[in-house]
Image (cartoon, rainbow, N blue to C red):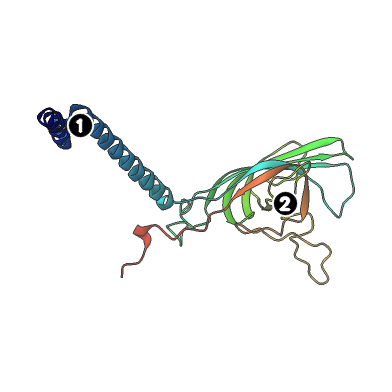
Amino acid sequence: MESSNGGASGSRIDAFDVCLDLLECPVTATVLRITAALATLATAAALTSVSAASAREDRPQYASVTGSARFTLPYVKDNDIRTFTFDAHAVPYSEPLPDVPTGLPTDARGTVKVSHYSAERDITYTEEGKVDCLVTSPHTATLTAVITKVSPGGPPDVGKRIGFSVYDGGSDAGHSKDRVGFSWNGVNLLPGKGAKSTPEAEVGTCMAPAPYAPVAKGGYTVHHADLLPPPAAAQPAR
């Protein structure tokens, strides 16, 4: 009985000893290989995720202002319909100047559209302009554009630079908290003593008043990005 029990026990121990060597245990070796492969894939995925996140952090972020909205003038009560549409995007250091060959961090491209329905005249005037400057801070922006097209009967603004400001109040239910401002209609004048008229001042790049006109319908999205330093090639040698 002892011999028989001992033999059986010895057989079980031998088998257990054999399977302790995982490379010689087919089932366990397969599981080990699968586990090792999964671990390798998980490590690769983690490294890829970290690499992608690092690439996103290293990639320059550019400002933009987009959207279309109807707004009202708080100091004018009329039935006119006024709308601004913006599609402006920062393109830093893309427009060389005679004394600044690198261009400026506020360089931008895109379009603006102005629409004004005059209830008194029963006509809609429109203008289109080419964006030349954009600067932002969180939720706010100023931009300028040079007018390239005016509808028949509109003001003689072709070639004139005009300025806009935008406040992005975020999304809300039922109405918009956004606001806009613009560089005409009494906010950019050159008053002088004894003058028979008060001319408008010329608008410089990215110049506009605070966004004083509340949006009534529609809205704008301001994507803020800090101004970037000059390209490495333009940095002075140390």
Is 181 displayed left or right of 62 in the figure? right
Q: Which residue is mark 2?
A: 180
Q: Amino acid at mark 2?
A: Val
Looking at the rendered image, the disc whose residue lies closer to the viewer, 1 or 2, is 1
The image quadrant of residue 153 is top right
Q: Residues within 10 Å of mark 2 (few under 14, many from 20)?
A: many
From the top left corner, tell me how far across and down residue 112 is, in percent.
Answer: 64, 43
The secondary structure type at the circle numbered 1 is helix
Q: Nearer the viewer, residue 204 or 33?
A: 33
Q: Which residue is mark 1?
A: 29
Q: Residues within 10 Å of mark 1 (few under 14, many from 20)?
A: some
The image quadrant of residue 238 is bottom left
From the top left corner, tell me how far across and down residue 198 is, in percent.
Answer: 80, 62
From the top left corner, tell me how far across and down residue 87 is, in percent.
Answer: 61, 42
Q: Which numbered dot is residue 154?
A: none
Q: Nearer the viewer, residue 210 or 53?
A: 53
When the figure is inspected, residue 189 is found, relative to residue 76, above or below; the finding is below
How much space separates mark 1 and mark 2, taking CA atoms? 69 Å
From the top left corner, tell me how far across and down residue 101 is, in percent.
Answer: 42, 58
